Image (cartoon, helix red, strand yellow):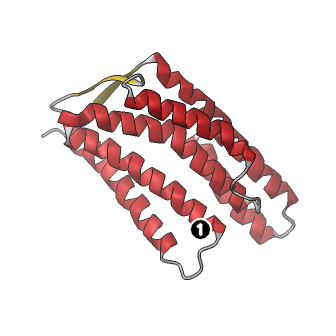
Amino acid sequence: MPLDYYLSLAVPASALVSYAVLMILVVRRRSLTRIHLTFALYLFVMVVWCGSSLMMRLDSEHALTWGTVLIVTASSVMPLSWFVFSRAFAGLNPVSRQLIPGIVATMIVVIAAASGLVVKSVSIDPVTRLVDLEILPAAFLQVFTLLIYPGWSGVILARAYRRAREPAWRNRIRYPLIGLALVM
């Protein structure tokens, strides 16, 4: 087997294990605050995303289903869960009216995905296990959550950073900001 094959499995598998271990560590804390719960929600979404990426390669017979799960979690649910975490981390109520448009958009995308209107086909090279995902125009409904909510999260975290007076707290806020910048 070529190196590409093993890398195509190793990358999502290692990400899946990393997110799952981190999620377990967060959930096993004695005192679960809103920040911990919202971060655990975000990590759970990332576990689903990485798991679907891995399963596309391992269960190529159902690659279309796994590809649909991957697209919906990556571009709709993940940005919303990061937004909720960012609000909690900044000391705001994580659940707000600002979530309603994103939830509605995500529900529309999930219904479109379940109807087969988001992913047209998924082909996996039998040798390298590289994935070619062909999306349909309905996938562009996800642009709303994929662009707006991570950007909005950045604004929330940047405001919290500017308001923070303690150097230790400012340093803590840098980590999610850096993470968001890397993802963007």
Would residue 25 be found to the left or right of residue 31 on screen? left
Q: Residues within 10 Å of mark 1 (few under 14, many from 20)?
A: some
Q: Residue at x 46, y 65 (%)?
A: 23
Residue wearing tag 1: 36
Q: Residue furthest bottom?
A: 30
Would residue 83 be found to the left or right of residue 166 on screen? left
Q: Quadrant of residue 181?
A: top right
Disc 1, SS: helix
Would residue 4 be found to the left or right of residue 44 on screen? left
Amino acid at circle 1: His
128 or 19: which is nearer to us?
Answer: 19
Q: Quadrant of residue 163?
A: bottom right
Q: Could you tell me residue 37's position as x and y percent?
A: 58, 65
Q: Could you tell me residue 95's position as x and y percent?
A: 69, 54
Q: Could you tell me residue 92's position as x and y percent?
A: 77, 59
Q: Residue at x 39, y 50 (%)?
A: 48
Q: Residue at x 80, y 57 (%)?
A: 160
Quadrant where the image shows the N terminus? top left
